[in-house]
Image (tube, coloured by chain):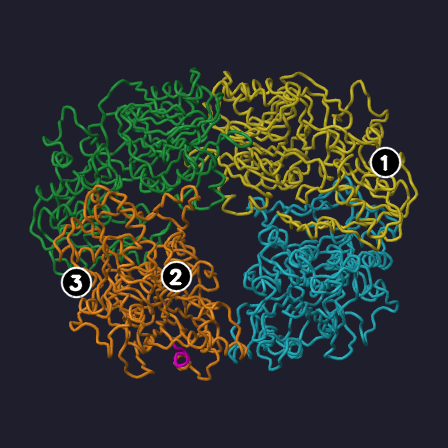
Chain colours: A orange, B green, C yellow, D cyan
Amino acid sequence: MTDLSGAPLGPHDDDKPHEECGVFGIWNAQDAGAMTALGLHALQHRGQEATGIVSFSETGPEARFHTHKGLGLVGDVFGDARIMASLPGTAAVGHNRYATTGATLIRNVQPLYAEFEFGGLAVGHNGNLTNATNLRRALVRRGCIFQSTTDSEVFIHLIAISLYTNVVDRLIDAVKQVIGAYSLVVLSRESLIGVRDPLGVRPLILGRIPHPDGQVGPNNSKEAWVLASETCALDIVGAEFVRDVEPGEIVIVDNDGVRSIKPFGDRRGRFCVFEYIYFARPDSVLDGYGVYEARKRIGAELARENPIEADVIVPVPDSGVPSAMGYANESGIPFELGIIRNHYVGRTFIEPTDQIRHLGVKLKHSANKAMIEGKRVILVDDSIVRGTTSRKIVEMVRAAGAREVHMRISSPPTTHSCFYGIDTPERGKLLAANHDTEEMARLIGADSLAFISLDGLYRALGHKEGRDAGKPFYCDACFTGDYPISLVDLDEDSRARPDLLTGAH
Amino acid sequence: MTDLSGAPLGPHDDDKPHEECGVFGIWNAQDAGAMTALGLHALQHRGQEATGIVSFSETGPEARFHTHKGLGLVGDVFGDARIMASLPGTAAVGHNRYATTGATLIRNVQPLYAEFEFGGLAVGHNGNLTNATNLRRALVRRGCIFQSTTDSEVFIHLIAISLYTNVVDRLIDAVKQVIGAYSLVVLSRESLIGVRDPLGVRPLILGRIPHPDGQVGPNNSKEAWVLASETCALDIVGAEFVRDVEPGEIVIVDNDGVRSIKPFGDRRGRFCVFEYIYFARPDSVLDGYGVYEARKRIGAELARENPIEADVIVPVPDSGVPSAMGYANESGIPFELGIIRNHYVGRTFIEPTDQIRHLGVKLKHSANKAMIEGKRVILVDDSIVRGTTSRKIVEMVRAAGAREVHMRISSPPTTHSCFYGIDTPERGKLLAANHDTEEMARLIGADSLAFISLDGLYRALGHKEGRDAGKPFYCDACFTGDYPISLVDLDEDSRARPDLLTGAH
Amino acid sequence: MTDLSGAPLGPHDDDKPHEECGVFGIWNAQDAGAMTALGLHALQHRGQEATGIVSFSETGPEARFHTHKGLGLVGDVFGDARIMASLPGTAAVGHNRYATTGATLIRNVQPLYAEFEFGGLAVGHNGNLTNATNLRRALVRRGCIFQSTTDSEVFIHLIAISLYTNVVDRLIDAVKQVIGAYSLVVLSRESLIGVRDPLGVRPLILGRIPHPDGQVGPNNSKEAWVLASETCALDIVGAEFVRDVEPGEIVIVDNDGVRSIKPFGDRRGRFCVFEYIYFARPDSVLDGYGVYEARKRIGAELARENPIEADVIVPVPDSGVPSAMGYANESGIPFELGIIRNHYVGRTFIEPTDQIRHLGVKLKHSANKAMIEGKRVILVDDSIVRGTTSRKIVEMVRAAGAREVHMRISSPPTTHSCFYGIDTPERGKLLAANHDTEEMARLIGADSLAFISLDGLYRALGHKEGRDAGKPFYCDACFTGDYPISLVDLDEDSRARPDLLTGAH
Amino acid sequence: MTDLSGAPLGPHDDDKPHEECGVFGIWNAQDAGAMTALGLHALQHRGQEATGIVSFSETGPEARFHTHKGLGLVGDVFGDARIMASLPGTAAVGHNRYATTGATLIRNVQPLYAEFEFGGLAVGHNGNLTNATNLRRALVRRGCIFQSTTDSEVFIHLIAISLYTNVVDRLIDAVKQVIGAYSLVVLSRESLIGVRDPLGVRPLILGRIPHPDGQVGPNNSKEAWVLASETCALDIVGAEFVRDVEPGEIVIVDNDGVRSIKPFGDRRGRFCVFEYIYFARPDSVLDGYGVYEARKRIGAELARENPIEADVIVPVPDSGVPSAMGYANESGIPFELGIIRNHYVGRTFIEPTDQIRHLGVKLKHSANKAMIEGKRVILVDDSIVRGTTSRKIVEMVRAAGAREVHMRISSPPTTHSCFYGIDTPERGKLLAANHDTEEMARLIGADSLAFISLDGLYRALGHKEGRDAGKPFYCDACFTGDYPISLVDLDEDSRARPDLLTGAH
């Protein structure tokens, strides 16, 4: 029996999988530090707990790296002009971090930076390594001293101890030893490097800023180059989309332009399907497919698969809005903003006393009674993880006078945890891992509950035949348990809790 | 010629009129301080710069008032359990404040509190007095020493020097001397008092929390009472709506229940119409009329008055969404989220250097290219103040590939400043005060521009005959220049800048 | 039986009477704000909890007052160049504050500033009013609203409500209503004013900075003028001593020079004798008598009155050093630094856990064993208040191996509380108020204990006949109970605790 | 020509050599963290810029290390009971740090802590390595990643990469590779270890806390053990002095008691003579010789070597006091506190504007005019480094009216920089390195100047024959240039500035 009560009211209690970090890098641009801050701002949805930038300035008294990191939003950490002035140079990398509270130590905030024999190097990592505990143990045995508790730091040490001479060879040496999901941005004195794991689970794209009128940029070159987790970070810095970095590809940007290395050969990837469903910003284009459009189509497919009579379609804001619109268009039932989201939540939540906790206070959502009272309501949301939020939302909608409440979910049931960079609870806490749909409906208090099917999801994303079980196009392990990358640390000792490692980057 | 360039990128540069403060008060409730924090959270949209609570505890070592104030969001200021524990008692008043940066001194943060001969008194004020400078000068001459630079402090001194004995008589004495717009919540040892100015320009409502099963509350009474700026603050504390406080009414809540005094007799009010258009939260009900519904009707009326052929209706988020939905429903043109709003803006903005300022960086909005490219777009927004934001939005939508951009505004042209509690720029900076619609269209770069008519606005709000110029139902001075309350300080010396007073509360 | 155990280990647990504030003012000087910061630094021994400066600049966009206050040392509060730049002008007043912790609210930090009909006024107060509660009650009844909980604020309100026109007349009006001990520095737009109460209990001196080579200063005058609590504040700003402000005198410094008013006529004063014993800095000259010299003579007199055989004279640092030197010179017994003081105590103390509290940890003092072991030690200290520190010191010296420990005190027994600006505990806690010398010796654990006699003290200060009981030269109420200023608030209701008023300024 | 003007007014502008760090460790004590805070407080004079503690708790959910570090005084960093509660356990090490401002990064604050294959290890270091740059370069080449810019971190990496199995063997391996001056306290899970370099340049002593009545302590053992830089840290925690750790000795404290290893065999040391002159606290006993007594004897020897007729002996406080007393006793000239030191300097200094800089403001010292005016004054100080402070002091004493000013210095001329853990300026800035005594007298403005001779210093310290040039007893390189430990980094490239390394620990 799943206990849905007593969930804490915290900033991350919205019962969603949590992203997972965003990365950004830029080469050959004036004000590279400020450009990176803007790019990170556009990627803020991928991580709000901490952020950092490392820039490199070639000129001045001495060429060197500059770092600033902090806990909080990009605007708060980099909002001070003096801080931006402390990040000079024409190249920079940056990172947004999501992390569970306890581990948000400043020394864990990325990009990680270290000085090597060949000079300084900064690394920003989105993803999660599945053999980090193993590697770390071996490195410590060898005499490496870790500064942080992040799995990302193994990259740094593998590069440091590599016997190869130059940065790129050392980096290849390193990525050949790690197993997991990773999109990296790496900054050395000579180059900006982007790396995507062999299956390309996490996104990484390449963009370009042409210099106006063919003018020459700071490094005698005509264009600046950008690496970013999503295309939405290109628009804000005036860059144009060039292409996705490919699975297993290393892209090297230096003053001679862009080179590509594929140390793992050509690979078919397994991009994370949840990026379409929930993580990515609606205006991003992933793998050639627009996220907003994708969500509307998923909503339409959901309506086709799971129709029901009702008076009004109400999205659970904000992520449920496009799929609810798709559902409404397909079903012909009116779309109304029946739930209002309060965006002014602040960094800390008001902790209700026991006395008023029973009020079931909802700090983020409130019901727009006029749109709900006396009506048959279809709520559209993107996922059910623990189910606690869904239960509260249904309760709130009923309290506002809904006659019926039907829940429609724009993803298949989330039955498995993610080990590739998404913060999900362990399986035992996933509602869908322990209950069938009917039980789930009862537990969240809905009159009916339905999920899009796995094939329906693939169809909505343009794969007309649905999912090809033999060689699935996406990583969909959270819905299927089909983990495309081996879970080394976990398999080796499934009882061990990887305490040294935080889950997501 | 209006200069639309060079507007600063600041947290309040969204070129909107700015609210203006929210008030909340509660009587006879366990955890009155925490309840007030929740109420203020629900009213956060009315003021984000500062917030404060004064509670009164009758029990304990000694009956006394407790205060905590701070700059920032309610969740940040009251998010610490120790702070909430420092606000014990069964009665409290609270205040959210909007203020231009310079004047956000902590001593200006409300509720204001003072100790009088009869005991302590806390006052929270939403509105603006038009004779505050005059009154202040007279009070200083008499020997009163002001602690703050707010106009609200005159209430405190008028109460202090009143020759009447009890609090209510002193308060009546005070409100008879002030001229302006004001909704007050006042807390003394014996009562919670709500006051609305004779024209009821700013909102104030009364709510009630019935004790479960008729149980008796802390003060041997069966119910708790709530005063708040908007109904959305009732839901979050589990209160039910009782009625609007009437124009010119003083409502006194004490352990005997609720009393009403009308020192100005019965009056017809002139409620602020802009509350419907922009300020109030969509799920609030003002004067019996739901805000979300009102906005959709305004959008529909706007579509009827100003139709144009187009491919897509795009709201300027977030406030333009309901009217855009109304416009879309009426016009039959598809509604799409063609502009994405970034809600993670943080407390401080990234200040772009001059180098990248020309990028026209938009930190709050980004275009959802896929919905815009190659299309004829109708943008729906609620108002144009300086026009700077509108110009940037149009520019952004064009840059995303729109074939045509038509702007539709769900309010009449804003031609006059507000002196009743809304922070608007002086007339010289109001685009509509200096240009006709055609010029405005050109200045913001739109292919066409149209506003809802004044009569259309009244019709959408249920006044079928439109505006009755002889006795208009609302205060619509910002559109008409018809100021229902005399502008004493301004008239007396129109050249003087009321430097001592901050504009809005 | 007096309980000497369990005294808290806090920054002010040194069991001394506590000063009591220092004031400083300057007129007609470049960088008046910085000069005042220096003067306050030299007066830091008179109050370390908080400090503030109000400056007045006549030039610039508008003539106006500038304020900065903070908790902590002068160097910490005014150590930032940007803060000093925010205090421009050629005139300033400043204040150092001692206060018991709870009441160190920033709004209590002086100088107090208010805007009156005639303009701004800043007031810094050293001393304590004995009818402040009475006056405050009357002022509140009249409608005055107090901002702080200090007795000093009554000056501000009495000036505000005075019917006289100019500042000086209003000030005279105010000081005629207050009863107590006070040295004031007052800054208006037109003048710097110094005031000393009719008995001149607290010190105040006048100094002058001649402009080099007769050059003309900022206000077309040839010299700058300084008011300060002690002469040590003159040296640091390059000023020369002019004279003591006289008891009951008002000194007005403006651009025409210096004027004097004596609203109470000519008076013989009763200067605080404890200033010589403990409060004043050794290099200050009070009333024409050098403090260091005075202490040495007191020590010599103490030796004559209370000789005993011993091996070594050890001062309790730092205040006991000069009197120990005098004692040593007179007795011929060697003087050694047998107790070392740790000056790096920081703002907060390490709170020992219960486990180690029994160690009797002494954070401020340590025994210099080599000078003590096996010896007969005479400890010289300046006073015994509660006796807790004396007991610990004796214990420490014994633990270091002293064969005998004799305590000699350079003041008579402290038997009464001070109500004139010195923070002393209530009588019940004064060791000498409840025990004879023999009992006291036993309680502090000394082999013998002796105090200088009252007559001896007067003789050491140059009054050869000792104390003239008919018209004593000093205020020595703490030794005699002979209170020269009536204790109005206390007499009226001796049971009332003056909670609204902090004790010392 | 030496420029004595324009020296900055900063907290460390007292023109003294700067210590240099203090270390403390404790084993088998309740509240080991709090005991360490107390010990560090007693060692505060050895470093005021930063402080840190690492404790180890064996019990609780899991045995582990706890760290807290901060910038500032011990009382400020560890004054919060919650912080102390976060340092549980029965063993701890701590460190006080002096550092030049720029490098006071929190990651440089010691003890340094790292996790190794064998578990965690914390290291606190007092001293300076002379081959750190060389070692660091080699370690980086091997793939070690440095976290800090301190030379102390090489210990950590040498231990990490050692091929030996246990901590002690690894530590021996490490100290055999480093060259320099170092006293270390090291904490592992199994033991507390003290290490002193082969010449014992920096002090380190062993103490013991017997458990009361033979009770058994936390680890079934009867006593707690303490390591500390000076004996003054024993008194505060109730420990008794056992012995000095010997040059080149490693002392291992574990639950079986105390063991000693001498990896370098038996060695005669070269203890730093400046510890007697200036650094150590007067109540400490170094190498069996009391510091206070030593200073008095040095003063007496100075008087014998350099007599002159005068009216008064005035110490430059605080360090000059004991030697001035010795000088006065020997010469028969009266000793007076003619210079008063202001101890309330705060963390930041008031920065004087240019306008008042010419005042020659002395924030730390003021002249006690009454003791100086018209007199022939002998000033006694402990050293002259740059000479800037001496010049100001002489100037101040002259301004106070001294007829003659003679300066006597209780150390030989400081002609060489220290590379063993004392922060001295480079040779070019040492006044005595560039001028003879007569010139120095002229530059500082004294009527005469004399230093104690090198032989006189040795005599005063009990070496009747003076200094044995063949095998000197102390390290006196700063007076002689006779550097007993090779200066590897410096010799290798005497032009290189060791930028990566901060000078002192």
Q: Chain of mark 1?
A: C
Q: Is residue D496 visible?
A: yes
Question: Residue beneath label 1, please?
Answer: C450
Res D492 quadrant in image: bottom right
Q: Is residue B396 above or below residue C50?
A: below
Query: Do labels 2 and 1 touch, CB within 8 Å?
Result: no
Res B283 quadrant in image: top left
Left or right side of C258 for B192 = left
Query: Quick check: do tags 2 and 3 share a chain?
Result: yes
Q: Which mark is residue A98?
A: 2
Res C452 quadrant in image: top right
Q: Is residue D108 above or below residue C289?
A: below
The residue nearer to you, when weighing B471 against C456, is B471
Q: Residues within 10 Å of mark 3 (few under 14, many from 20)?
A: some
Q: Chain of mark 2?
A: A
Looking at the image, how many numbered discs can be counted on the residues? 3
Mark 2 to mark 3 CA distance (whole Å): 34 Å
Which region shows up in magenta?
Answer: A174-179
Which numbered mark, 1 or 3, is in the foreground of this view? 3
